[in-house]
Image (spheres, rainbow, N blue to C red):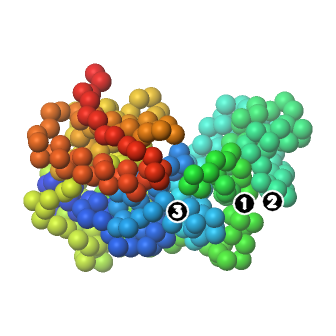
Amino acid sequence: MVTTTKHPVLSPRALNRATLDRQLLLRRSPLGVEDAVAHLLGLQAQNTKPPYYALAARLEGFRPEQLSTLMESRAVARIVTMRSTVHTHTARDAVALRRLVQPGAPDRELAVFVGRKGLDGVDLERLAARSRELVEERPHTPKQLREELLQEWPDADPLSLSVAARCILHLVQVTPRGLWGRGGQVALTTTDVWFGDAVPAETADLDETVLRYLGAFGPASVKDMQTWCGLTQLRAAFERLRPRLLVFQDERGTELFDLPDAPRPDEDTPAPPRFLPEFDNLLLSHADRTRVVTPENRSRSWKGNQAFRVFLLDGVLAGLWHLEETKERVTMAIEPFEAIDRRQREELLAEAERTLEVMGPQGVPYEIVFRAPER
């Protein structure tokens, strides 16, 4: 939203440093793993390893086993939430945020499949009840769920049936899926079964979630938060909270809201290199991403629907990194978008070594190579 009211202007670099600080990327945080997952309102988890790499870039003393243990104990879990994509959340957020975003991307995705006629003749209430019965009896893979539902609705589109169940019900991906060093197919059950009475069936308070979003991603506009969570018409919540917030604007005049006591470091604060996983929330949680991605580089971290692993230099997207793992050796290839100087190379090498020492298999040697970007 463009406003004629004059508020203090925050440059892209000032926004960059503020966001990096909220994202625990200016310096590694001493936060515990569960507290960090809560602070960040979850970690993008379309693939199984990104949450681990996301925390390795952000936390002091992190070991992958720490997150894996929390998953195994059901203190955190994998579930479809924001933007109808898989995130790793604390148990409480897995329930509360999933309920909050239901009118957003999940309901819109369901409407798309209904509109494609793949669910003609399917009673959605009955589908939800039957799906709940199946996955609560025992976890089902999407394929198994489709096969069971096809027995009830043989003329329906198989994919539409399982997607509808996923959109309507609040389904957790059960372990061993997502555990560090262990494989497992996606298998689903309800949050009610997975968490039991340990987590209340509450919907996250919208105003509180706005404040939490600003604490993790601010300063930010209304549109920024809508992009992050997949909900629309959030202006009223921001207006309710306006007396409790500071208001800035970017260089184009867009209103940016923030918590009064949130950190906004000097724009000259050093930002160390960081290696981030594909789909990291730093890159997906604002409508205007110029605070971390220059317009010329925005398309270079994606191909089709696939995101690449990226690294930051001076706080902004500066290149890609690739990992090749065998039983004999781990190779990290660093691919800058532009030429880098000796100091930047040395800093990247140091950060790459730390990343591999934390995340690499114990006892397996590694090497780090630089290569020219693919054009």
Q: Amino acid at mark 3?
A: Glu
* Residue denoted by label 3: 65
The spot of residue 8 in percent (x, y) is: 13, 64
Spatial distance from mark 2 to mark 1, Cα to Cα? Answer: 7 Å
- Counting from the top left corner in percent of width and height, residue 332 is at 36, 39
Residue 190's disc is: 1
Indicate the amino acid at tag 2. Answer: Glu
Residue at image location 41% in from the left, 65% down from the top: 62
Distance from Cα at disc 2 to Cα at disc 3: 28 Å
Crowding around mark 3 (Cα neighbors within 10 Å: few <14, some 14 to 19, many 20+) is some
Locate residue 118 relative to residue 305 in the image: left or right. Answer: right
Determine the residue located farthest toward the top in the rendered image: 375
Q: Which residue is mark 2?
A: 136
Which comes sooner in the sequence, label 2 or label 3?
3
Between 315 and 152, which is closer to the camera in this rendering? Answer: 315
Whether residues under marks 1 and 3 lie with C-beta atoms below 8 angstroms apart, the answer is: no
How many neighbours does mark 1 have within 10 angstroms: few (below 14), some (14-19), or many (20 or more)? many
The label nearer to you, 2 versus 3, is 3
Please state the horizontal and vertical placement of residue 131, each as a whole percent of the image. Answer: 80, 51
Tell me the element at label 1: strand
Front position in the image: 228 or 24: 24
Q: Nearer the viewer, residue 220 or 374?
A: 374
Residue type at tag 1: Thr
